[in-house]
Image: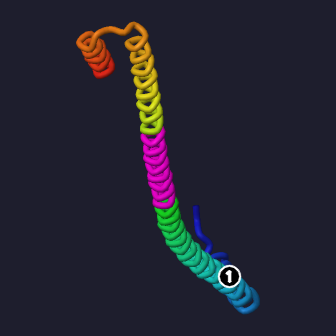
């Protein structure tokens, strides 16, 4: 294959002319478009970085707010727990006081009943003594026999 010098020179001259025309008319426009695209991409990257930073700050703020909410929730729970314990203690104290009052009333009532029973026994003893005296008088028993009967009666009443 043989290279023709005139064709080679013509091709180089055509290439240089084509390059000069393209450079003069198109390279500036293409370079401007490329620069414009590069600037747009850089702006979008900067905006994305700013948005990522904002998102990170929002996430940090949300985490702080969540932590505060948890702490506040714990405090509220603790306050309610303390109130519940206080109410529980009041209820227990009231119940104990009520139980003491009921016990005291029962003791008073028992003492009253005991006194009633003692009074009734005394009346019965008196009635029996009167009845015994009537029998002693009616039977006209001697004095020693009377003492014996009264002694037995007192022993019986004393044991009851």
Vertical relation: 121 (above or below) 54: above
| Residue 85 is inside the magenta segment | yes
In the rendered image, which quarter is residue 1 located in?
A: bottom right
**Measured from the top left, where is residue 3 in percent x and y?**
59, 69
> Residue lying farthest right?
25
Vertical relation: 33 (above or below) 125: below
Any part of residue 22 in sight: no
Q: Quadrant of the C terminus?
A: top left
**Residue at figure coordinates x 61%, y 76% from the top left:** 51
What kind of element bears circle 1? Answer: helix
Query: For this view, does 46 lie left or right of residue 115?
Result: right
Between residues 99 and 105, which one lies in front from this camera angle?
A: 105
Between residues 3 and 28, which one lies in front from this camera angle?
A: 28
| Residue 99 is inside the magenta segment | yes
In the rendered image, which quarter is residue 55 located in?
A: bottom right
Query: For this view, does 12 lie left or right of residue 88?
Result: right
Q: How is the image coloured?
A: rainbow
Q: In this figure, which residue is indicated by the disc labeled 1?
A: 40
**Measured from the top left, where is residue 134 in percent x and y?**
44, 16
Between residues 158 and 117, which one lies in front from this camera angle?
A: 158
Vertical relation: 55 (above or below) 154: below
**Measured from the top left, where is residue 111 in percent x and y?**
42, 38
Range of magenta residues: 81-109
**Residue at figure coordinates x 54%, y 71% from the top left:** 65
**Measured from the top left, where is residue 90 in percent x and y?**
48, 56
């Amino acid at each position: 294959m043989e290279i023709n010098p005139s064709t080679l020179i013509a091709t180089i001259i055509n290439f240089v002319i084509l390059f000069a025309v393209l450079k003069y008319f198109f390279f500036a426009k293409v370079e401007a478009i490329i620069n414009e695209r590069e600037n747009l991409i850089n702006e979008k990257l900067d905006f994305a970085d700013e948005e990522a930073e904002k998102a990170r700050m929002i996430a940090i703020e949300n985490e702080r707010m969540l932590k505060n909410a948890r702490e506040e929730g714990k405090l509220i729970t603790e306050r309610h727990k303390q109130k519940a314990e206080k109410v529980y203690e009041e209820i227990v104290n009231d119940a104990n006081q009520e139980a003491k009052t009921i016990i005291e009333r029962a003791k008073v009532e028992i003492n009253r009943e005991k006194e009633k029973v003692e009074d009734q026994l005394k009346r019965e003893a008196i009635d029996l003594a009167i009845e015994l005296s009537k029998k002693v008088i009616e039977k006209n028993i001697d004095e020693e026999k009377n003492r014996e009967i009264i002694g037995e009666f007192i022993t019986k009443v004393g044991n009851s």
